[in-house]
Amino acid sequence: MSSTAPSTSTSSTPSSSSSSGGSGRSRFVIGIVGKPSAGKSSFLNAITDALAKTGAFPFTTIAPNHGVAYYRLPCPCARFGLQSQCRPRYGSCQNGTRHVPVEILDVAGLVPGASAGLGLGNQFLDDLRTADALVHVVDVSGTTDAAGKATVGYDPVNDIDWLTSEVHAWVFNNLTKNWGGLVRRHTMLKASPIETLHKQLSGYGCPQSMVAKAFDACPKSLRDKPLETWDQETDVKDFVTVFLKTRFPTVVALNKIDLPDADTNIEKLDRKYGQSQELVLCSALAESFLRKLAKQGFIRYTEDSDEVVTHDDDAKLKPMDEKTAARLEKVRDLVLFRYGTSGVHQVLARAVEVLGLVPVFPVKNIHNFTTGAAKAVFRDCLLVPPHTRVRAFAAMVHPELDRNYQYAETVGGRMMGEADEITLDINIISIKTSES
Ligand SMILES: Nc1nc2c(ncn2[C@@H]2O[C@H](COP(=O)(O)OP(=O)(O)OP(=O)(O)O)[C@@H](O)[C@H]2O)c(=O)[nH]1
Ligand SMILES: [Mg+2]
């Protein structure tokens, strides 16, 4: 990721080397998992400008596909009546709605037994090591079996469980592949369980604090048990279950809601998981279709809404042939009318929300919200982890801001302490340095 070098004084230019807050372009990665043909690549294409290959047969994707999606949130420029001056460095601002880039990563399909080598195995899950959260795409239409082959009347109710257990096996196998050696080292070094577990799990791109958080979330009986006496089949497995929740918060996207059996399956899945999982309904194909028609000038479509304008409403739009018009009518009836939207942007929004990310707007001048000489306001927006403190945020924006840190102010010139946590309410910040 590239970034512009900051001025030596206050700057909102994000750092490309930031380790925890990320660059203003896209630091957070959402990984897409699911069985073959669930619609993972279709989801990527629907929400980004990627053109990943899709197909009604398993293992269309083998090498991972990347794309950049845009998380939407109210931009402060609207609150201050500065929309005309709002020019984001990355992403965009449309009528006061900020579009913040988030990277999406689509990997190969996973089948039951993948951890024992079935399908493509689960080695490709290693591609997900950079992901911060996961979207599990489930084919809710019942038209593909567990291996992703075309069928009718398949019951997807167990798809969430077996996929979760394959991801579990991926982490468990890595953690226990040399458990004897790990325990010997642990005893020899008199290390804490968190240090030892972190060492073995560091390949998952997690700081020790995340392992500590997972460890703290384990039952007391497990925390009190010396690591060298942990039973692999029970204790280690339980720890991995908790670790996965911390390391890979997951949203389940119930995809293909445009197909006939979706309703019944949605009900079943909701009954089983409604309380315990984040379930969001979507149709990747409907969204791609609507975007394509809009790009070709047949419709005006407001993404994330049910607003579709056609030639019948506005003669400036191209008229559609009968087949396309019939397909559009179907998408309107089966998706937009029934669910309000295609749902793909809700999936992204939930993924950002399960991570608890807070949007922060660093500015040089806290009174007019500009950065540098230009009149442009709110140039940057960073999504930062929950409970990020002001000083840590300065380091995320640029190491220079941390090195030369003096103080921070928010709207109205109100001072902020360096240990203050950034919240959704106080998220416009100017860092002053000794060079300012
Ligand atoms: N009706 C309908 N079909 C969809 C939807 N999303 C995807 N599909 C179709 O499902 C098939 C599989 O889609 P892909 O996106 O290739 O699935 P995948 O999960 O990436 O599959 P692999 O790469 O093989 O793991 C394609 O024929 C898509 O057109 C949807 O929302 N509705
Ligand atoms: Mg694919």
Image: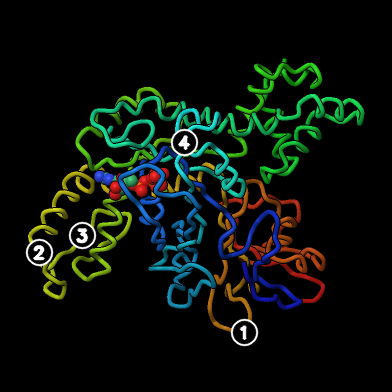
Q: Which residue has dot 3 on it?
A: 308
Q: Residues within 10 Å of mark 4 (few under 14, many from 20)?
A: some
**Whole-percent x, y for residue 293 in the image:** 23, 64
Describe the element under mark 4 as helix, strand or loop: loop
Q: Nearer the viewer, mark 3 or mark 1?
A: 3
In the displayed structure, does residue 397 sit left or right of residue 67?
A: right
Instruction: Give me the disc on residue 321.
Output: 2
Describe the element under mark 1 as helix, strand or loop: loop
Q: Which residue has dot 1 on it?
A: 373
Q: Do callouts 1 and 4 mark residues in contact (Cβ within 8 Å)?
A: no
Q: Which of marks 2 and 3 is in front?
A: 2
Check the image and report above or below for 72 versus 340: below
Which residue occupies 45% across, 33% down?
111
Q: Quadrant of residue 235?
A: top right
Q: Do callouts 2 and 3 mark residues in contact (Cβ within 8 Å)?
A: no
Q: Which of marks 4 and 3 is in front?
A: 4
**Whole-percent x, y for residue 84 in the image:** 43, 77
- Identity of the amino acid at label 1? Ala
Return the disc, 1 or 2, that comes first in the chain's sequence: 2
Describe the element under mark 3 as helix, strand or loop: strand
In the displayed structure, does residue 247 sit left or right of residue 185?
A: left
- Distance from mark 4 CB to nearest ligand 1 atom below 8 Å: no
